[in-house]
Amino acid sequence: MYRELEEEVGLKPDMVKVLGRTQSWLHYRLPKRFIRPSEDPVCIGQKQVWFLMRLTAAESDIRLDADDTPEFDHWRWVTYWYPISAVVDFKQAVYRQALTQLAGRLSPQRRPARRRRGGR
């Protein structure tokens, strides 16, 4: 997780505080139309552990160009549940699962309102 954090957004471990993680691995499978049989190994999905972190450094410390091959060209703060509606449909269940598990790790005054399935 720390390696990914540094590669993708230039943050070192002392620049964040880990508030929680998902209870176990979360899985999604790629729809057949996204599977590339010519790749080796063939990717059929992914399993992930999600972490909830608080940024303890300044926003200006976020560096999308920290790696030679940046994965992102911009970033922004969004509401807690927004990622579910912004991700491709086959990942939505995993995002919902992760955010639901992690919501309890937020302080009571920062805890987001519970989402209704399919709503915003």
Image (cartoon, rainbow, N blue to C red):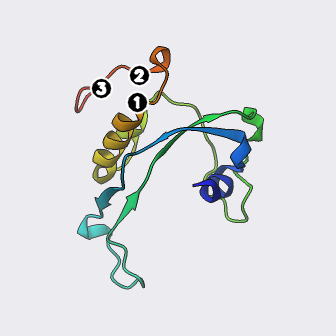
Q: Alpha carbon of mark 1 to alpha carbon of mark 3: how far?
A: 11 Å
The mark tally for this picture is 3
**Residue to which mark 1 is pinned:** 103
The amino acid pointed to by label 3 is Arg
* Mark 2–mark 1 CB contact (< 8 Å): yes
Circle 1 crowding by C-alpha within 10 Å: few under 14, some 14–19, many from 20: some
Distance from label 2 to label 3 (Cα)?
8 Å
Q: CA distance from mark 2 to mark 1?
A: 7 Å
Q: Residues within 10 Å of mark 3 (few under 14, many from 20)?
A: few
- Residue, x 43% and y 21% (percent of image)? 111
Task: Specify which label sits upstream in the sequence, 1 or 3.
Answer: 1
As drawn, 47 above or below 120: below
Query: According to the image, label 2 marks what residue?
Result: 112
Compared with 67, 120 (above or below) is above
| Residue 99, horizontal then vertical, whole percent | 38, 37
Check disc 2 and give the amino acid type: Pro
Q: Place residue 66 in its image quadrant.
A: bottom right
Disc 1 + disc 3, Cβ < 8 Å: no
Please report contact status of discs 2 and 3: CB closer than 8 Å, yes or no. Answer: yes
Given residues 49 and 93, the one toward you in this image is 49
Picture coordinates of residue 105, whole percent (x, y): 45, 30
- Specify whether 29 is left or right of 11: left
User: In the rendered view of the protein, which quadrant contains the C terminus?
Assistant: top left
The residue pinned by badge 3 equals 115
Residue sticking out furthest to the top: 109
- Residue visible at 45% across and 17% down? 108
Q: Nearer the viewer, residue 89 or 114?
A: 114
| Foreground label between 1 and 3 | 1
